[in-house]
Every structure is written in structure tokens, then in C-alpha cells.
Amino acid sequence: MKALGTHIVCELSGCNPATLTDVDAVRAMMEAAARAANATIVTSAFHRFQPQGVSGVVVIEESHLSIHTWPETGYAAMDFYTCGDHTDPWAACEYAAEAMGATQMLTTEVKRGIEAGAGRFTHVVTADHDTRELAIA
């Protein structure tokens, strides 16, 4: 199956609340995750909400990485979408989980941009609800 991109939807639980509300730490982590995926960063934009929480995106030549955090619950919702054969969105996902101090990672992988004929494209869920308990450092 030839796909134009791989999109990982990631739920991180048990994250460090202090990290989840620190916009500079979240930005640095997301940019490092992009580099871990072997992606080329174009730009990034992040915002810290009051009283807490961060949302942001790292635009990469190969697509994007995004995050939304809820420090009060230790939760981060993330997307890792990369195109091309030289990037590895799983490397970015695993980097982020470790950097956020997550105790659990739930992921769904979607292959996107699959030709469906007549100039149409579709997607296929290829790894549905992979739950991993993570070691606490």
C-alpha cells in the first residue's frame, strides 16, 4: 500500500504537569521531536493559556507536529504527520512521550494519501489503539 504520509494520533497520560504548562519547554521538546523524526523545521508557533496549558505546532517540510496540553490532568494530545520515506513519525512520538514523562501512550496510526482511483485519495487506519505503559524515570 503506497501512502503519501503517516499520521500518528497520540494520547499521553501521566505527564509532568510543570512541563505541560511551560511553553518554552513544550516548544523545545516539539522541535527536538521533529529533529528526532529526521524532519526539516520550517517554523513553529506556540501559545500558553491562562491559567495553564499550551497549544502549538511545528510546521515541517514534510507536514506538521502539533500538541495541546492539559496540565491539570497530566494529559497531552499530539499529532505527528510526516510525508516521505526519510522521516519517522514514531521516533518523534516516542521522543515526546519520554520528554513529557508520560506513564502511558495510546496511539493510532493512519496511512494517508492512498490513491483510490479516479483522482480520489483515502486513508487507512493501520495500527489502531496501541497502548503502551511507559517506564517512569
Image: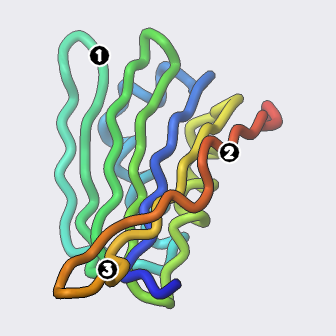
From the viewer's perspective, is residue 115 above or below residue 101?
Answer: below
Q: Residues within 10 Å of mark 3 (few under 14, many from 20)?
A: few
- CB within 8 Å, label 3 to label 1: no
From the viewer's perspective, is residue 47 above or below residue 21?
Answer: below
Q: Which mark is residue 130?
A: 2
Q: CA distance from mark 2 to mark 3?
A: 26 Å
Pinpoint residue 38: horizontal percent, then vertical percent.
49, 80
Q: CA distance from mark 1 to mark 2?
A: 29 Å
The residue depicted at 47 percent of the width and 87 percent of the height is: 2
Report the amino acid beneath label 3.
Answer: Ala
Q: Quadrant of residue 81?
A: bottom left
Select label 3 or label 1 by which is in front.
3
Q: Residues within 10 Å of mark 2 (few under 14, many from 20)?
A: few
User: In screen coordinates, is 105 left or right of 68?
Assistant: right
- CB within 8 Å, label 2 to label 3: no
Between 122 and 34, the one lying in front of the other is 122
